[in-house]
Amino acid sequence: MKDGEPFPGLEEFQEMVEEVLEGLPPDFKRLMENLAVVVEDVASSLDAARAGVRNPMQLLGTYTGVPFIQWGRDRTAAPPDIIKIYRLPILSVASGAEEIKDKVRKVVLHEVGHRAGLDERRLRELGVY
């Protein structure tokens, strides 16, 4: 965070997300094919409802698409799957630069886990929640 700013702005927050993605092991690179990762301030009412969440401020991230474990060999070109990371809800549950970075990391890894085909139970077991 820049001096005098209590929370990261959108650009700095996007850089945090990109750092997590760049730090993924090489084996994960296939998961990133045809995937858009977007940072938004808060989920739309529609995105929140699709995730089963009433209050968009309670939704930290979403994944929309076909999980890797369901890809077939002949997977054709399609619009990209989407991971959305929501800045304001993450900032509302984390305090301090290190806690914010840790929460961003966990949320990004959580959504990449969904992309890989992991369910909520398995993500909790792995500590990516």
Image (cartoon, rainbow, N blue to C red):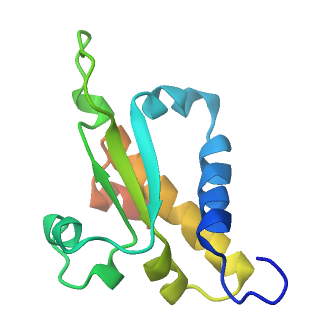
Between 9 and 107, the residue placed more toward the observer is: 9
State the quadrant of the N terminus: bottom right
Q: Quadrant of residue 2?
A: bottom right
Confirm whether residue 35 shows in the render.
Answer: yes
Between 69 and 41, the residue placed more toward the observer is: 41
Q: Is residue 87 above or below residue 91?
A: above
Q: Is residue 99 above or below residue 61?
A: below
Residue 91 lies left or right of residue 77; in this view the side is: right
Residue 36 at x, y percent in the picture: 42, 42
Residue 62 lies left or right of residue 70; in this view the side is: right
Q: Residue at x 23, y 9 (%)?
A: 74
State the quadrant of the C terminus: bottom left
Q: Residue at x 33, y 49 (%)?
A: 114
Residue 77 at x, y percent in the picture: 27, 18
Please identify the residue farthest to the right as the structure is shown.
3
Q: Is residue 26 above or below residue 110?
A: above
Q: How many marks?
A: 0
Q: Quadrant of residue 15?
A: bottom right
Q: Residue at x 63, y 77 (%)?
A: 100
